Image (spheres, helix red, strand yellow):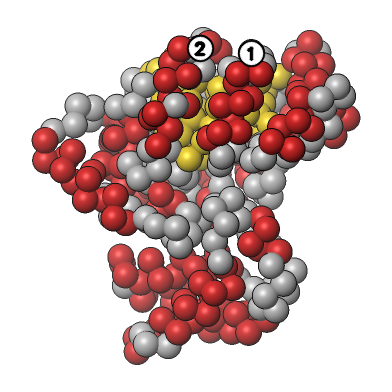
Amino acid sequence: MATTPTALLTRRLGKTDLAVSIIGFGGIPIMGVSEEDAIAAVRHAHDVGISFFDTARSYRTSEERMGAALEGRRCVVATKSDARDAAGIREAVDISLRNLRRDTIDLYQLHGVNSEEELGTVLASDGALEGLHHARTEGKIGHIGITGHRPSVLIEALEQRDEFETVQVPFNVVESNILEDLVPLCVERDIGLIAMKPVGGGNFSNAPLAIKWCLNQPNTVPIPGMSRIQEVEQNAAVARGGLALTAAERAECERMKSELDHRTCRRCRYCEPCPNGVRIGALLMGRSIIQRVGPQRFRQWGTREIIASAQQCTECGECIAKCPYDLPIPELIREAVAYYETISDLAED
């Protein structure tokens, strides 16, 4: 049965004219928890007023779990596919419709367009954008967007074609260079800006403030990843609070800029699965978990198996090729294992 959620402030998602909650639900993390916990988190988010949910074909079980959680509920759902030709993305749309248990998907996005070559492919005759045109004519999708990690490529996409109604890109208190070019372009053309990684993949020490910073940027709807009810509550509280940044909060935002660098894993897990069974995400995330909440949480993940999996790394480079941040992942794995060897309290109970 459909439920009526608690109201949150809403924001118009650019020229789509979709009214969405000022904070959306990022769907990557729910593929890393049990199906029961994932569905509970999504339903709770809807119950507390979050009305915008973003997932993707490549997020393994995320679409199916989101579909099960939101069936019969009124909300705005976005998904995306990295298919590059018209036939491939039309097939992807049909799969998404079944997974999400919806007659129409509100927003369908070209996923991870990160190079001029990829952009040329999706914009070409019989490219993925043409496939989305057909899907929209058929009533299978409502609006078209594009996502990527290279702002220059996204700017080129918006300048070449006017079909894109939203753009999704990493945007946070550290990765804020798009304030100089992409954000003004979105404002000028009324493009909805969906901020992925608003808390730096979970690396910022003050996640609520990082989200609040995003809420102060024009045309922007942040979609922090969530997988647990506690995270949902924390993020909903930000949406209900005052949005103006105080002088002290602005100073804290400046301090947080030191918490991300070119060697920091953002937890997107695009590097997985590893063909050799290396638990890349857990290996790289564990260090941050230990430093923030102690080794007990990491032990709950199964430290013995995680650390042992690092021995399977052949440095084949496949993970580096898939990482949108070009991180030296094998090197970071070695550093992580060396760090874990210094933690005396890491042995599993």
Image-based side of 114 in relation to 118, left or right: left
Residue 72 visible to an observer of this rendering: no
State which quadrant residue 187 falls in.
top left
Identify the residue at image location x=67%, y=75%.
315
Q: Which amino acid type is shown beneath numbered disc 1?
A: Asp
Give percent across and percent down for residue 244: 19, 27
Residue position for label 1: 162
Give percent across and percent down for residue 232: 39, 42
Identify the residue at image location x=55%, y=33%.
152
Q: Which amino acid type is shown beneath numbered disc 2?
A: Arg
Q: Residues within 10 Å of mark 1 (few under 14, many from 20)?
A: few
Identify the residue at image location x=82%, y=16%.
134
Q: Is residue 347 above or below residue 15?
A: below
Give percent across and percent down for residue 69: 58, 37
Q: Is residue 218 above or below residue 29?
A: above
**Is disc 2 placed on a helix, strand or loop?**
helix
Identify the residue at image location x=38%, y=66%.
288
Image-based side of 15 in relation to 296, left or right: right
The reply to whether discs 1 and 2 touch (Cβ–Cβ < 8 Å) is yes
State which quadrant residue 132 falls in.
top right
Residue 322 visible to an observer of this rendering: yes
Residue position for label 2: 189
Q: Is residue 111 above or below residue 1?
A: below
State which quadrant residue 348 falls in.
bottom left
Q: Residue furthest left?
A: 247
Quarter containing the N terminus: top right
Image-based side of 127 in relation to 188, left or right: right
